[in-house]
Image (spheres, rainbow, N blue to C red):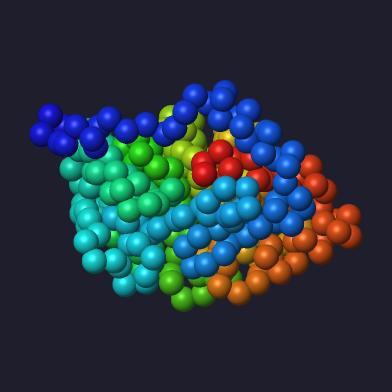
Amino acid sequence: AAHMDARLLGGNMGTDADARAAKVDALLERLTDEDLVRTLSGRSMWTAGGLPHLGVPALRMSDGPHGMRGCSLTGDLGSILAPCELAMAATFDEGLISEVGTLLGFDCARRGGHVLLGPCLNMQRSPLFGRHFECFSEDPHLTARAGVAYIRGVQRHVAACAKHFVCNDQAENGRHTMNSSIDEQALREVYLVPFEAAVVDAGVESIMCGYNRLNGKFCTENDWLLSKVLRGEWGFKGWVVSDWWGNQSTGPSIAAGLNVEMPGIEPRHYGGYLLDATKRGEVSRELLKERCRPVLDTV
């Protein structure tokens, strides 16, 4: 750490929390239902929300977890590429992993991002899972400690996004529709452990839902997962985003706890139907404000 640029170690995540909360509260009172829905809806491949008439920028996200990809699918010229998570965890060095996170967070902020989409906290459970290199380990404790170190580093400069919540650990074929059937003891002793640490120990600002079903219910609309466990038991105060094209509904998802639907290339369940559901009285204005609050706090 002593050899790193001082700028990389000197960032912070913004102004005093109380002052920021007051600013968000005042802004929420000014927003129309259209503004609230826009804040929760993807606008492009990598941005969500944005209220130009009120001076609120769009929330800009970019893939990690090994560097900021940028606003293209192939990666922008000049992106920093770090060793993959599997290689990071093999060092068993939390300080080094935190340094890598700090470097990646700094690069994301330098290039105009608000959120780095990482770390991946899934378990290496199946040889058919094509994204093992993006995961730290098959061990929940090692994954948790590496994830906490990574998040603390990234969040010196931008928000981290822990993904893919949860049990998105199987084959790539059918990952948009598969059902992970896992009893509660295994969930709590293995699969949820790294995410709990990300929330409780690292204060991660955002979490991305997996594509899969968990015990029959899509993660994006799983109220046990998003409301009871994540917010109720762990005290998560941030926001939840769908994986890209991973949201499957309007009312059930926003009620369960999904804040932001991505992407926004075409109108989907939020961008296409959420305002109509609000006008019909199926989704309350208070719920929209509740889902918008942490998103605006990050912006």
Q: Residue at x 57, y 23 (%)?
A: 18
Q: Does residue 153 sit above or below 175 in this rendering?
A: above
Name of the residue lying farthest toward the left? 3
Nearer to the camera, 4 or 24: 24
Counting from the top left corner in percent of width and height, residue 231 is at: 62, 37
Q: Residue at x 82, y 48 (%)?
A: 284
Q: Is residue 284 left or right of residue 200?
A: right
Nearer to the camera, 153 or 144: 153
Q: Does residue 252 sit above or below 56 in this rendering?
A: below
Counting from the top left corner in percent of width and height, residue 84 is at: 25, 55
Counting from the top left corner in percent of width and height, residue 69 is at: 33, 62
Q: Is residue 60 left or right of residue 56?
A: left
Counting from the top left corner in percent of width and height, residue 100 is at: 24, 43
Q: Quadrant of residue 260?
A: bottom right
Q: Residue at x 51, y 75 (%)?
A: 174
Q: Does residue 43 sit above or below 3 in this rendering?
A: below
Nearer to the camera, 238 or 230: 238
Nearer to the camera, 92 or 112: 112
Q: Residue at x 15, y 36 (%)?
A: 4
Task: Please give the count of numbered marks on the rendered protein.
Answer: 0
**Quadrant holding the N terminus:** top left
Residue 50 in view here: yes
Residue 165 in view here: no
Q: Quadrant of residue 289?
A: top right
